[in-house]
Image: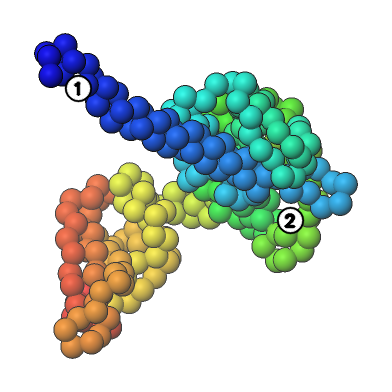
Amino acid sequence: MTQPVVVLVAMLTVLLLVAPARADKAADKAQDTRYHAQQLGEHIDNMWSREGEGAWDIGAAAGDDNGKARCKALITDFENDGAKDTDKIPLLDDGPDFVKGEISLADAKLVCDRIQRMVTIKMWEKWAKFSMQEFRKQGGGNIKFYENCLSTYDEMLKQGIAADATVVSKKVNDAAGVAVEWSGTVKQLRMKYCDAGYKKAKEEQEKRDAPYKKVIQGEKLATALLYRSAYLAGGAVTNDPAKLAAASVWFIDTEPPQVCPNGTQRHVIHRFEFAGNKLAKSTDISTCGIPRAGNFK
């Protein structure tokens, strides 16, 4: 066999081997593309629901713990397969912006943008609902919930949500289990529960703080407002501001999630020693079982 013929045979052999491999690779890529298109379509289908003819709402799984819509990652996977905006996404159910059948990837991106906006609002609504529950309690509730509501509201606006964006109307329960109408714009809800709640809680907090502020100052006051009561030398506990002001050493008993070798609960006693109103020294004392009077010295 002449050399040209040998070369030709070798080339044909290579082509016969490479062609199927390329075909298999192309088939695998097409299968991946179909899979990610179907996965995205199923996700969009499952995210939307409504009761009767009510407003469309998204499910809890629409966003991750960081407030990012999960459909964003699915779209990225689809595009990594080489998908174009004209490629089709199969949908089995109707939604707020589409009917069952097929939508283009470009339209799916718009749907995902809407889901992202709703996820962002719901991340804030969590704190707004907590604030509503606190607001309806006697005594003004925990001010931390209102502070979180206000700070996450500002963050939500920075992410492009308008103050007149509306929430999905529904009934939600307060802390006592009483149904409350939840509707309106995010600004209206912020003003009704977060702003008003913060003002109410701040006033109540100032009333609680006043007796301590009257007789204690500085770092000692900060410690008093943090714990509100303390053990004194000998093991007597008090929340009397005058007694706390007169004592130079306070003890705070805590119970970490630890068990001693003998099976009893471990206690860690924080000992605060003050020089006037300044914290001079702090140490920890570890005990097994209920602390005794001798531990407070």
Residue appearing at x 60%, y 44% in the figure: 43
Q: Position of residue 290 (x, y in %)?
A: 28, 83
Q: Residue furthest top?
A: 4
Looking at the picture, tell me which residue is in the foreground, 92 or 16.
16
Location of residue 256 with respect to 6 vertically, above or below: below
Image check: 39 left or right of 296?
Answer: right
- Mark 1 element type: helix
Q: Position of residue 150 (x, y in %)?
A: 58, 37
Q: Which mark is residue 10?
A: 1
Dot 2 alpha-carbon crowd within 10 angstroms: few under 14, some 14 to 19, many 20 or more: some
- Comes first in the chain, label 2 or label 1: 1
Q: Are marks 2 and 1 in contact (CB under 8 Å)?
A: no
Looking at the picture, tell me which residue is in the foreground, 64 or 132.
64
- Mark 2 element type: strand
Q: Identify the image's colour scheme: rainbow, by chain, secondary structure or one colour.
A: rainbow
Quarter of the picture containing the C terminus is: bottom left
Kind of residue at disc 2: Val
Count the marks.
2
Location of residue 147 with respect to 79 vertically, above or below: below
Q: Which mark is residue 89?
A: none
Looking at the picture, tell me which residue is in the foreground, 183 or 5.
5
Dot 1 alpha-carbon crowd within 10 angstroms: few under 14, some 14 to 19, many 20 or more: few
The image quadrant of residue 121 is top right
Q: Which mark is residue 172?
A: 2
Gap in angstroms between the C-alphas marked 2 and 1: 75 Å
Q: Position of residue 278 (x, y in %)?
A: 25, 47
Mark 2 vs mark 1: give the one in front. Answer: 1
Kind of residue at disc 1: Ala
